[in-house]
Image (cartoon, rainbow, N blue to C red):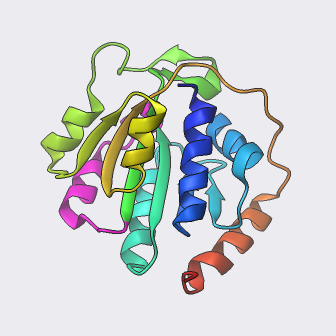
Amino acid sequence: MKRIEAIALAGLAAAEQDALLICNIGYPSRELFSVCDRPESFYMLGSMGMASSIGLGLALARPERRVMVLDGDGSLLMNLGSLASIAHHAPDNYLLVILDNCCYGSTGSQPSCTRLGTDLAAMARAAGVRRVRRAEDREQLAEALLEQGVVVAGVEAGNAHVPIISLSPQEILERFMRCALSAPQS
């Protein structure tokens, strides 16, 4: 499955679930913006490795809201401690989707440690995350997007040809904050 296909599936699931969606930096944010832009999506434009932590904080602050995070294997490898925090707090409204393409896609597709054998699902389990799944195709990912915890989705390396996000960082923040502070739609 191509990463943009997984992102489109997650974007649609987030819209159907009225979820807040945090997306990691670089091409994944650009791809999400191009296939499923919503004010409820927060596009990371910096702070590599922080999407999982930002999403966790949001889930803890807004327990009545569903929070989904799209993170890359390279970004998560920069902040492995977030897995222990996710395990410790284990909010029922939080799902971390790790898009594992075995490389740093936004900087030239240099191999990440997952290409060399690092198993992020096993690491999440070792950190104490109770709900960990793998998804290798669209059907498995669609099922996992209804759950909580961590899902490691295997995706192909390669970036889609999509434009740069046309919103300023301030616009992204302001429209997302309006949604994050409002009550969920019923």
Q: Quadrant of residue 95?
A: bottom left
Q: Quadrant of residue 85?
A: bottom left
Q: Which residue is drawn at 62% across and 47% down?
A: 46
Q: Residue at x 27, y 49 (%)?
A: 83
Along the line of sight, the residue nearer the viewer: 133 or 16: 16
Along the line of sight, the residue nearer the viewer: 157 or 86: 157
Tell me residue 176's x, y (percent).
66, 70
Q: Which residue is drawn at 44% across and 29% down?
A: 137
Say left or right for 104 vs 131.
right
Q: In this view, does 38 lie above or below 47?
A: below
Q: In this view, does 26 lie above or below 55?
A: above
Q: Quadrant of residue 140?
A: top left
Magenta segment boundaries in residue numbering:
73-93
Tell me residue 80's x, y (percent).
31, 42
Q: Residue at x 58, y 25 (%)?
A: 2
Say left or right for 122 vs 108.
left
**Number of callouts in the render?**
0
Q: Residue furthest front?
A: 139
Q: In this view, does 106 lie above or below 130?
A: above
Say left or right for 76 vs 148.
right
Q: In this view, does 141 lie above or below 16?
A: above
Inspect the magenta stretch and tell me whether residue 71 lies in it: no
Can the viewer see residue 25 in this picture?
A: no
* Quadrant where the image shows the C terminus: bottom right
